[in-house]
Each structure stands twice: as structure tokens, then as C-alpha cells.
Amino acid sequence: MVEHIKRDRGDLFGWPVIGFLLKNPAFLFALKTAVLLLFVYAVVYGIVDPGKENLFTTALFWGLFWPLFMVLSLGSFGRLFCGICPHGFLGKYITRFGLKKKMPKPLQNPLIGVVVLVIGWWAVYYAYPGFFKSPYATALLFVVMTAVAALFYFLYADMAYCKSICPIGAVSRGFSKISSAQLATYKSSCGDCRSFECASACPQNLKPFTFNGRNSMTDCTLCMDCAGACEAVSFKLQPPSAPLFKKFAYHKAEVWAFILITAAISISMSFHHALGRSAIVEEFFWVKTARYAQSLFDFGTADAVGISAFLYAVVISVALAVGGMFIAAKILKRPYEQTFYTLGYAFAPLFIIGGLSHLLESFFLHTASDIANGFIQGFALPFGTVEPLATRKDAWLHIFGIFNHLAGVWALVILFGRMRLVEASKLRKTLAYPFAAALILLYIGLNLYKGYVFKTYGVNRGGHGQHRSQTMQHPADGGMVKPTSSAERVVITRHAS
Ligand code: SF4
Ligand code: SF4
């Protein structure tokens, strides 16, 4: 065990206050306990007060935890969310007293968590947008997730739930490679070590002294237990996405998480939420398909357009990623699987950086006030209602759109860097590049197209989400009207402006 070490300047553990807090077991225990209590309180609050007047439960889960803290921290410092996660915190103790069995092979696949997230959450979200949003449903969802997590922690060793089943763990492992911080150890100190306190302290049974050599933190959840056990553990700042420019053993689930999350969130939302607000909404193929399906089947309360947009987004994204990489592999004369999983890491920024655009805009439009009002209600604080920090009329909100473009450019840069890891001639790499980038080019093209559509045709006066119904509330008419043709909508929009 190393007791003193001269830390590099970029090592956050050496910084005043931050370093002290991150390495202080008492502080971390208090912080994790506070988050756990907040979690339990919000769940109980959701069950006791299940109606829409309960602002606290939804504000905590769907405002503060996810997406605000999760997306902001994942892209910058990595899996800090896991570091304070109540499930991970409880799991450490449950697993200690559990049966410590080996997880059955079929359950050891982290793709399980990715599929649970994409189907169990996002598909349901587009079909029934309000399904998980009520305080009661939110509370119930987290009760079920906690019960499942506790069962897995009890049955299986090494925090198996975090490694394969948890939907957040499945995606955050890959996305954390974008971040600007890495946990590892000082090689010079670890050379003579025979006690391996860092590994003994790790609830995941990981070996932090191998992270540097592997260029990967594997399943590390940044719980910081190892940092409290040995001074040789470091948490250093690094250039953004640094690991992605070097070799590491690829993890299939990570690349699939990038593709499916980009499809389920970035592309689906561009179709359904962004272009769904344009004046030519009825002209898009996913809307036309939904209208046709509605003429054949009764969708009840389900959002046919949402389902259609989601399915198209997933099929198109997967087809472009797989097809593009297949052609690239042929041009490069390299095995398909190796090409797909080596170059597929370039898709990482699309959601985690591009998502900042929507996240920050929403923060000013409603998330900040939702969280403030939720806490005022939840803890009976003596403050009045907090108003949103901005409205859709505030032009400065568009500045956050820069993250959409940044994500596309950064993905192309990473793809360029990862092409260097493939053995092929320069000519072959140049020819293969646009095919390997097919999904990235879709993402960039879609962002440019959104700008073109709104500039040319304007916003649908029926407002966001009007396409859920065959008829719409037209504010100017004060009643229900049949949707007009796109040409008529354009005239209406231009007339209005
Ligand atoms: S992997 Fe899931 S359960 Fe484990 S710490 Fe992260 S968020 Fe929590
Ligand atoms: S390597 Fe360290 S920070 Fe990561 S999970 Fe293990 S003990 Fe926690």
C-alpha cells in the first residue's frame, strides 16, 4: 500500500477541496446516504401523492437525476452518476452478505441492459408519451428496478447487476469514454506492490492498476472505494475522448449502445419532436405511414406517429451503421466484425454531446423551474413559484444548437483517429471513410435539414405534438379543425408571421 505520492498537476485527487472530498470515505458515505434518502423520499412521495399535483417525484427523477446530472457528468467526468447511485451504494452491502454465485452466462451480456432501455423505456415513451411521467408510475418503476437490482446483488457476485442488467450501466460504460477524466494508478508506485489494496477494496472486483495498460476503466463505476484504500490511485484530467484515439479491447455492447441510443433518442426525436413541429409535418414519410396504419387499425390512446418515427429511426440507423461498415470493411479488406467494432466507437459523441443541445435548452425552458418547484413542494420550503428562465421566444436559446453540430464534427474526428488503428493503405482508408461514417452523416444531414425546414416552411401553428390526432386545435380558430395540406400550412404560417 502506498501512503504518500507526488501527484501530477492534472490529478483531481491532488486538488484542494475537490481532491479531499473525492478521497474522503466519510464524506462520500454521507453524500451517497443523502442521495439514497432523497431517492427513497421521492419514491414514497410518489406513492402517497400519486396525482399530477405532486411536482417533486418527477422533478427529481426526470429533471435532476436523468437527464440533467447524468448527461452533464457522463460527458465531462465519466460515470459520476454511478458513483452516487443508490442502487450501486446499496448493492455494495447486499452483495457482501449475498450468495456470491456466478452470474449465468446468458445473463452476462450487457446488451440486456441496452435492450431494456431501448424497448422498455424509449419504445414505450414514443407509444405512450405520458406513461412513465406520472408520479405514481415513476415511483412504481423505481420500486421494481430497486427490487430487481437487490435480487441480483444478493444472488450474484461482483455487482453483476451493474455489469449486465442495469440499463444506465449498460450505456454509461461506453459513453464515459468521451469524458475528460480517467481513474487509474501511478505505475511507478504499483510496480513493487504486493498487497493490491485498491483491488481488494473494489466491490466490482476490478484491478485499477491495469486500467492504464488496457486504456479502459472496464466496469468502473467511480465509487472511489479504491481511492480511499491506496494513495497510488489517481483521477486525472485528460484531453476529451482521449481513450478513443488509442487501442483497447472493444466491447460489442458499447458500440450497440451508441447506435441504438442515437437512434432511439437523437434520430427519433429529430423526426418526432423537432420536425414534428414544422409546418410540413404531414408530408414526412413516418407521419404518412402512421396515418395509413391508423386507417387500418385502431391505435386507441397510442401515439401512432411516435411509434412510426421510432421504428423508422431504429431501422434506418441500424441499416446505415451496419451497411456502411460492411462496405467499409470490404474496401479496407479487413474482417467485418473487427472493422465494425473498431470504427463504431466514433458514434459515441452523437448522443452524449449532441444531447446537450436539447438538455440545455430544456433546462432554461422548464427543467430548472421544475426542479426548483419540485423541491419547494417536496420540502415545504418558504418560497413562491419559480418561473422558467426562458421562453421559446428567446432567440439566444438557439445558441445551444451548436452542440448538435459539434457532436457530428467530433464523431468525424474520432472516426479519422480510429481509422489509424486499422491496417490498410491510405487510399483504401480514404475510400472507406464515408461509408464507415454513414450514421454520422445521417445525423449531420438531419440537423442541417431541420434548419432548412424551419427556415423555409416555419413552425406548425397547431403546436408541438399536434400530429397525435387527426384533427388539431387551431389557436386562431378556437376549435378543432382538419389538418390542412402542407401548402396551405405554409401560407398560414407565413401569413401569421
Ligand atoms: S450501473 Fe446502474 S445500478 Fe450500478 S451504479 Fe451505475 S446506475 Fe447504479
Ligand atoms: S476501480 Fe475503484 S472507483 Fe472503480 S469501481 Fe472499483 S473501487 Fe470503485
Image (tube, rainbow, N blue to C red):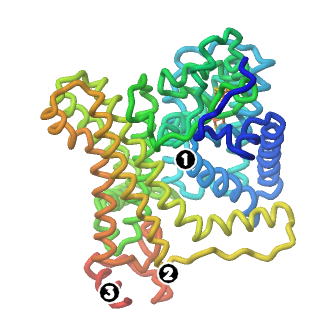
- Work out whether 310 lies above or below 253: below
Q: Which residue is mark 1?
A: 76
238 lies left or right of 46: left
Q: Which residue is mark 2?
A: 393
Q: Residue furthest top?
A: 194
Quadrant where the image shows the C terminus: bottom left
- Work out whether 29 lies above or below 155: below
Give neighbour class at mark 2: few <14, some 14-19, many 20+ (Cα, 10 Å). Answer: few
Name the one closer to the observer, 62 or 306: 62
* Callout 2 secondary element: loop
Q: Earlier in the sequence, mark 3 or mark 2?
A: 2
* Residue 150 visible to the viewer: no
- Is label 2 in contact with label 1 (beta carbons under 8 Å)? no
The label shown at residue 176 is none
Q: Earlier in the sequence, mark 2 or mark 1?
A: 1
Name the one closer to the observer, 71 or 47: 71
Residue at 58%, 37% (x, y): give it.
236
Give neighbour class at mark 3: few <14, some 14-19, many 20+ (Cα, 10 Å). Answer: some
Percent from the top left, x then y, of residue 461?
42, 80
Residue at 49%, 21% (x, y): give it.
213
Q: CA distance from mark 3 to mark 2?
A: 17 Å
Residue at 58%, 69% (x, y): give it.
364
- Dot in front, 2 or 1: 1
Give neighbour class at mark 1: few <14, some 14-19, many 20+ (Cα, 10 Å). Answer: many
The label shown at residue 494 is 3
| Amino acid bearing label 1 | Ser
- Dot in front, 3 or 2: 2
Quadrant where the image shows the N terminus: top right
